[in-house]
Image (cartoon, rainbow, N blue to C red):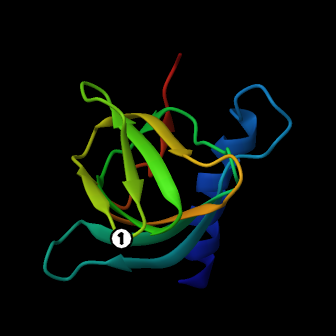
Amino acid sequence: MKALHVFTALALLAAGPAFAHGTDEPSEKVTVLQDQMLKNAPGKKALMIEVDYKPGQSSIAHRHEGTAMAYVLEGEIVSQVKGEQPVTYKKGQYWYEPAGSEHLVSKNASKSKPAKLLVFMVLAPDEKVLIPLEN
């Protein structure tokens, strides 16, 4: 099971530096906290990750095959899903993204303070956590 955690973390991180907005700065730090098959939802798993942003750091535009719920643990996060306006979420606030949503913006709102998210996802074991968007 531990190998699965490492594999998932590596899969998440592998996309980051390759698409890091044309800079040498690596993407956000992603830590897999839990990865468990769900007994009450056959064929689905729950994934809990922590996303750490340095000041001014952002994620690449992406989509998730699974459902995602995010909670701001520290700082402020700007998030925008396709078809919606960008929203700045502060510590203690949260949001929901249906499976397949295109997450156009996910970034630390501050250029001087770090930010941290807790993300809970439900997806099939063969579904990708993060798929970079073209353009």
Question: Percent x, y for residue 6?
Answer: 64, 72
Q: Which picture quadrant has residue 113?
A: bottom right
- Going 32% across and 72% down the picture, which residue do you hit? 46
- Going 74% across and 35% down the picture, which residue do you hit? 18
Query: Which residue of the protein is positioned furthest toward the top in this rendering?
Result: 135
Residue 21 vertical placement versus 2 (above, below)? above
Q: Which residue is mark 1?
A: 92
- Going 53% across and 16% down the picture, which residue do you hit? 135
Question: Percent x, y for residue 119?
Answer: 41, 64
Q: Secondary structure at mark 1?
A: loop
Q: Is residue 123 visible?
A: no
Q: Is residue 38 visible?
A: yes
Residue 115 vertical placement versus 81 (above, below)? below
The amino acid at mark 1 is: Gly
Comparing 71 with 129, the one in front is 71
Q: Left or right: 76 with respect to 18?
A: left
Question: Percent x, y for residue 93?
Answer: 32, 64
